[in-house]
Amino acid sequence: MSPPEGDSTQARTSGGGSARVSGKHRTGTDRYRREELPAEDPITERIEAASAVELTPDQSTAYCRTVGGRGRAAGPPAPCVGSTSTFRWLLASLVLLVALAPGRTVDLFAGDDPDSPPPAAETARPTQAPPAEAVQRPTVQEPFRGSPAAGWASGAAGISVPKAGAVGWMSAAEVERALARSRDFLVGSGLDREVLRGARPEKAIAQINPHQKDVQDLLKTAFRTPSEKKDLLLLFSRFQPSRTHLVGDVVKTRGRLTYREGERGALQVTADVTFVYPVTHAHAGGDDEIVRTIVRRELILSWDNPDKVITEPGTFSIVSYKYDMTSGGCGAPTGYFTPPFGPDRRADEAGTEVDPYDRSAPVGQGEPVGDECGRATRS
């Protein structure tokens, strides 16, 4: 369910290790409104077919040399006793494994392969959290290892866009353009490499209605003196390069855009997207510690009819925003995510548990309140 129009909420949790995170949680509110296996192929048949495979003497000898001959001194091959039956047994076992659990078998060989196909695009809110992964430490080469995000799409590809239809004052073609531009904003605010490294998000800011005074005031203030209610992280993802470095060139994402008719016939677009940023300390030694800062944002954007609302072509008004965050810092807002490293990653057993990969509940639901710290169940 979307939040009430005009309600802006932030929920932040940070701290801890790869499977458990602790940190300080704060909640603030502010309001911004526009002024105006098949039956024909059973498992037993597959096993019988595999067991029926026969090897010629030459094939048996070659197989024996390949599997059993490594590390021996040069010379004639050792006798290959039982190679044919061994091969048949191995083949039958592999067929059985594939038949019983094809998905897990693919995972076994694929690992954290960036070329592995991602799961189907998200078109509606999931009904449950992703299954638990084996706890594995992330590395510079595999920064998403041991995380559900390892199977997610990268960058904008993980943000699904629905088929456009006419809504309010917009035709289907105009809605399609507005949806594309809405996703462009998510790219400019949460995926742009320069912005992630601390640059000012000029392109993204240019898409916001310049006549929406409250939001423009927020932006001006947040860059100079950020606070709980004037926090750039409500809209943008930024890390301080003197403290934090991104690991690799990939940010994993999962989420969707939806739309409906809003006030005065406006096109109202809701974005609900989770971003996973692998980072390390800027001054890390040889054994780099990889932390994954996980941010889930929900934004409601209004593409207004210029005949009814003061706006500029190609811009939208912001109706509301929310975000949840883990391993991104829990102190006073600085305009940057501040992932905890080393001793700062302490567990807090008293905090409310938060699964940052669970997209089945609305943003902010089940989060800690007030100054209570929260614990991420995984990272």
Image (cartoon, rainbow, N blue to C red):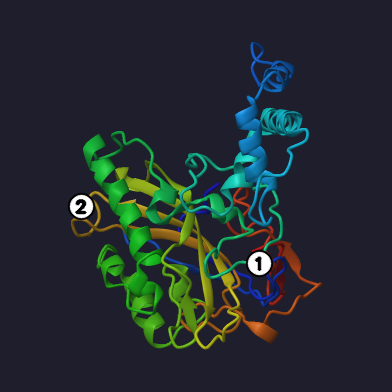
In the picture as drawn, the residue positioned furthest to the front comes out as: 75
Residue under pointer 2 = 306
Residue at the (43%, 75%) spot, across then down: 238
User: Are the residues at dot 2 and dot 1 in contact (C-beta closer than 8 Å)?
Assistant: no
Q: Quadrant of the C terminus?
A: bottom right
Q: Earlier in the sequence, mark 2 or mark 1?
A: 1
Residue 363: give x, y in percent of width and height.
58, 56
Up-down relation of residue 199 to residue 115 (above or below): below
Q: Mark 2: few, some, or many residues within 10 Å (few <14, many ≥20)?
A: few
Up-down relation of residue 15 to residue 127 (above or below): below
Image depth: mark 2 or mark 1 in front: 1
Residue at the (49%, 70%) spot, across then down: 30
Q: Nearer the viewer, residue 291 or 223?
A: 291
Residue 164: give x, y in percent of width and height.
32, 36
Indicate left or right for 178 with 107 as reference: left
- Whether residue 268 appears in this view of the structure is yes
Q: Which element carries disc 2, helix, strand or loop? A: loop
Label 2 amino acid?
Pro
Residue under pointer 1 = 137
Q: Mark 1: few, some, or many residues within 10 Å (few <14, many ≥20)?
A: some
